[in-house]
Image: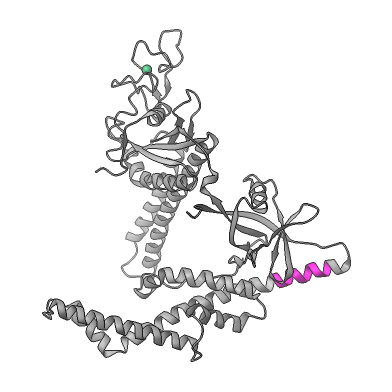
């Protein structure tokens, strides 16, 4: 069995290496930055050329189909097979003939792309275009990687382009510059005698890696690549607008490398008070809340106000005017912004949950199944909660947690949400009204102490964090269900 691995991208700042202090060394550094600038000034143009030729190649075949009367006839016959009273046998024959025509078009397409040479593939045809024009200024290794990246991503959505659902992309200066990280099997990430680490880029450019404060522990990962623990994929170097350059290192981490405790479970409670609360099944303290209701409501209010303003303006604009189109576009942009914000929050939240599980060495994450969610928890659903349910997209959040967990080697289970917020996670006692407020839970079982929290001098109890209690119940639950209701 092949090793399963997860790809991660690490962003590490790089600088061109200064080989010494002499004047020649200074000149060399200057020259090398100039080489790099020229590559950057031209690479996006090469990328645009490649993608337009990908489109052209497809369009050529499309035209062949369009200009073949027989092909068009067959298409029409098949489309209205009932009206044309075709028998099964007719359909079979027509489909066979269409298939034959397809392969003829494919052949003609390739012949055309080969320019009569009878040699080369489709990928070669786009490479030929760019190497012809940029071969002198962009290293061939870079062009090859670029061509591979663009042609393979283009083929993934070429049908959508054909159907008009999208257009070809437009590349701008500053796209990542791809390069082969291995040459003839030799890793181009290297360590010098003085211990410094660099990337050997085509044309002899050496990029020094600088880890800075290294909050994301990049050095450790690079060390593991150097000692062969992790493999790497073809990477790139990207220049930002403020002239900083970053290595985007693609690291393949074997899934087996992760060994987490399969008996330790993180329970994740989704709610409105605190969007996410995590707790462990085997720990009576701990737990972590992520995000806040206030932050969410503030954002909601700001966006709602902007929207109202736009809608009001729209009503005052005459029909069909240029201003109206602009305002409609602005409204669309705003809605897009709203979605993006929720999406980004979900990314941040899901990442925090995975990190919490990893920090605690937990091999399992348990969450509530969302069906009927909200009703079991609260006797009535307040309007804020309804809004959050609709916009927050807990479903998306769970999906993100699921795939990120998978990548980290963590199992995800769904549990029956029944009474998770109204049951005491210490003694298991269930009774209505134990969640005395949105944020506080007090166990009503007279024999239970831990579920009541601190005792005040007047005999009342402080209670425990209600979200934490629910998260613990979720972590402790053994009522495993399918994610979607059967
Ligand atoms: Zn209790």
Q: Which residue appears farthest toward the bottom when viewing the image? A: 116
| Count of all numbered marks drawn on residues in the image | 0
Depth order, front residue of 11/295: 11
Depth order, front residue of 229/204: 229
State whether the magenta stretch is mostly helix, strand or loop: helix
What residue do we see at 64% from left, 68% from top?
184
Indicate the position of residue 333 as horizontal and vertical percent values. 42, 59
Quadrant containing ligand 1: top left
Q: In the rendered structure, which segment of residues is drawn in magenta?
A: 26-36
Q: In this view, does 160 lie to the left or right of 18?
A: left
User: Is residue 353 one of those drawn in magenta?
Assistant: no
Indicate the position of residue 462 as horizontal and vertical percent values. 43, 17
Whether residue 296 is situated above or below residue 465 in the rendered picture: below
What residue do we see at 83% from left, 70% from top?
27
What residue do we see at 51% from left, 27% from top?
286
Indicate the position of residue 194 as horizontal and vertical percent values. 81, 53
């Amino acid at each position: 069995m092949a090793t399963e691995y997860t790809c991660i991208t690490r962003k590490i700042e790089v600088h061109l290496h200064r080989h010494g202090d002499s004047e020649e060394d200074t000149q060399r550094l200057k020259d090398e930055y100039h080489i790099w600038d020229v590559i950057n000034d031209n690479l996006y143009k090469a990328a645009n050329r490649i993608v337009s030729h990908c489109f052209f190649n497809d369009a050529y075949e499309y035209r062949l189909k369009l200009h073949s009367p027989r092909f068009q006839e067959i298409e029409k016959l098949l489309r209205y097979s009932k009206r044309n009273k075709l028998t099964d046998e007719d359909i079979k024959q027509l489909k066979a003939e269409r298939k034959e025509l397809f392969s003829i078009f494919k052949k003609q397409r390739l012949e055309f792309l080969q320019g009569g040479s009878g040699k080369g593939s489709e990928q070669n045809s786009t490479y030929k275009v760019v190497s012809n024009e940029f071969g002198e200024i962009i290293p061939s290794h870079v062009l090859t990687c670029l061509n591979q990246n663009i042609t393979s991503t283009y083929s993934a959505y070429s049908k959508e382009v054909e159907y008009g659902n999208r257009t070809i992309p437009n590349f701008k200066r500053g796209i990542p510059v791809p390069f082969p990280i291995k040459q003839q099997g030799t890793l181009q990430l290297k360590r010098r005698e003085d211990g410094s680490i660099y990337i050997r880029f085509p044309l002899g450019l050496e990029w020094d890696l600088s880890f800075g404060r290294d909050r994301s522990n990049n050095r450790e990962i690079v060390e593991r690549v150097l000692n062969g623990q992790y493999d790497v994929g073809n990477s790139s170097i990207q220049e930002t607008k403020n002239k900083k350059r970053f290595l985007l290192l693609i690291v393949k981490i074997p899934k087996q490398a992760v060994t987490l405790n399969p008996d330790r479970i993180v329970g994740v409670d989704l709610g409105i008070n605190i969007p996410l609360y995590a707790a462990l099944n085997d720990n009576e303290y701990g737990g972590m809340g992520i995000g806040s209701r206030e932050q969410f409501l503030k954002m909601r209010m700001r966006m709602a106000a902007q929207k109202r303003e736009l809608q009001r303006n729209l009503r005052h604009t005459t029909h069909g005017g240029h201003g109206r189109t602009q305002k409609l576009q602005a409204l669309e942009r705003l809605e897009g912004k709203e979605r993006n914000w929720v999406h980004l929050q979900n990314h941040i939240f899901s990442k925090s949950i995975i990190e919490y599980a990893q920090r605690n060495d937990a091999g399992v994450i348990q969450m509530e199944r969302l069906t009927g969610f909200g009703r079991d928890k609260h006797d009535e659903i307040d309007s804020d909660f309804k809004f959050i349910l609709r916009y927050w997209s807990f479903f998306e959040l769970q999906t993100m947690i699921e795939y990120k967990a998978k990548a980290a080697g963590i199992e995800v289970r769904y549990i029956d949400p029944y009474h998770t917020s109204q049951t005491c996670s210490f003694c298991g006692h269930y009774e209505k009204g134990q969640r005395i407020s949105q944020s506080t839970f007090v166990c009503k079982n007279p024999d239970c102490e831990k579920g009541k929290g601190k005792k005040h001098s007047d005999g009342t109890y402080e209670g425990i964090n209600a979200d934490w209690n629910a998260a613990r119940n979720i972590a402790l639950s053994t009522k495993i269900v399918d994610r979607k209701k059967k």
